[in-house]
Image: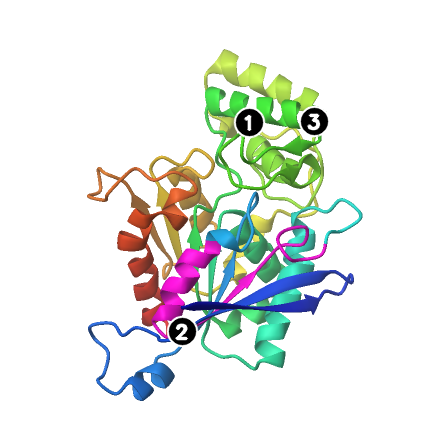
Amino acid sequence: MINKTLKLVTTEDHQQIAVWEITANEPQQTPNDSKDKHKHKHKHKQNLLFIHGAFSDKTVCLGIASYFAKLGHSCFIMEWRGHGSSSQPKENYHLEYIAFYDVKATLNYLLNELNLGNLHCITHSGGGLCLTMFLTRYPEYASSINSISMFACQAFAAATTPLSYAKILMLKAMTRRLGVVKGKSLKLGTMNESYYLLSQWIDWNLNQNFTPYSPTPIRRQLLRLARLQSNNRFLKKTGTLTTPQPFDYRTLMPKVTTPIYAICAKGDSVSPPKGCLKYLQAFKNSNNQWREFSVANGNLEDYNHTRIFLSSHAAKEVWPTVLNWVQQHS
């Protein structure tokens, strides 16, 4: 039986962030476990923090968290502000709020209040972006994290062809008018997201940058699309159309020295494999690993953005690779 215990932690900007502890009544043993259950549970027990992405809450993490809990590990799921059991902000917020307030409050709770060691972070999609931004601003926390596993995470490489660029630009135009991005309609998740929140990810991909929040007018991006179509070249040939920013997060990503395992899916159009690879390469760490799951690579399916994280096939062949990564860095 899986148990879920809620703890609300307070951020520096006075939001209540839900941190769920996931435990199993009778942890299972792996084939390599010692016959001494007590020895196994305490010698090899690790602490894992799961961070979901947009259009979702703790439910997308429950499957993989339960998998680890049944093996005797301590598991925690953080829910973004405005999601699940976390408080609903009265004002709009973007991804930096989640990174610099929500993630910080959660890690402070785990590391300082609970005094946890052997901490590993497992993220899906935007959860990995938020963790990255947090660690670039607070690199001192990296030494307390043994490893990171990022599922389907990229920020600036989903619009590298005229067609993919046009699709994301159309998404921006439509959702800007509606003020909301409908997760169910787009088959991205069970929740809706505000245009204010998602526009940051949209602009990163359209502009091929990874900068602090700074909205880009659609008209500039329309001009860029026209240039792409006329030249039939990738965006890197055209340059960006935004005003230069003080910095790009990519310049700070090499400061994150925690080993990262990047998991991508062949059928993922939100975080395409090449985009995930480019994102991982920005850390410039030879200890990081990248893996694409696909039928061509001998896997069970060409996973999409969500199935790579929570499907039954992922449970069979993807989750065990994360377990191996955690064990390697325990």
Give x and y (percent) for residue 276: 42, 44
Q: Secondary structure at mark 1?
A: helix
At label 3, which amino acid type do we have?
A: Leu
Label 2 – label 1 distance at C-alpha: 39 Å
Q: At x 51% / y 27%, what residue is drawn?
A: 235
Q: Does the rendering let one see residue 283?
A: no
Query: Of callouts 1 and 3, which one flags the residue occurring earlier in the amino acid sequence?
Result: 1
Q: Answer above or below: position of 235 versus 278.
A: above
Give x and y (percent) for residue 3: 48, 69
What residue occupies the far front of the structure in this picture?
Answer: 1
Query: Of callouts 2 and 3, which one flags the residue occurring earlier in the amino acid sequence?
Result: 2
Name the residue beneath numbered marker 2.
73
Q: Secondary structure at mark 2?
A: loop
Going by the image, does 202 lie left or right of 330? right
Give x and y (percent) for residue 181: 62, 33
Residue situated in front as seen by the camera: 221 or 230: 221
Name the residue beneath numbered marker 1.
168
Q: At x 29% / y 60%, what residue is drawn?
A: 320
Q: Is residue 62 magenta?
A: yes
At label 2, which amino acid type do we have?
A: His
Label 2 – label 3 distance at C-alpha: 43 Å
**Circle nearer the viewer, 1 or 3:** 3
Q: Is residue 83 magenta?
A: yes
Q: At x 76% / y 44%, what residue is drawn?
A: 92
Q: At x 40% / y 45%, what residue is drawn?
A: 277
Give the residues drawn in magenta, as a range.
61-87
Q: Which mark is residue 41?
A: none
Name the residue beneath numbered marker 3.
178
Count of picture labels? 3
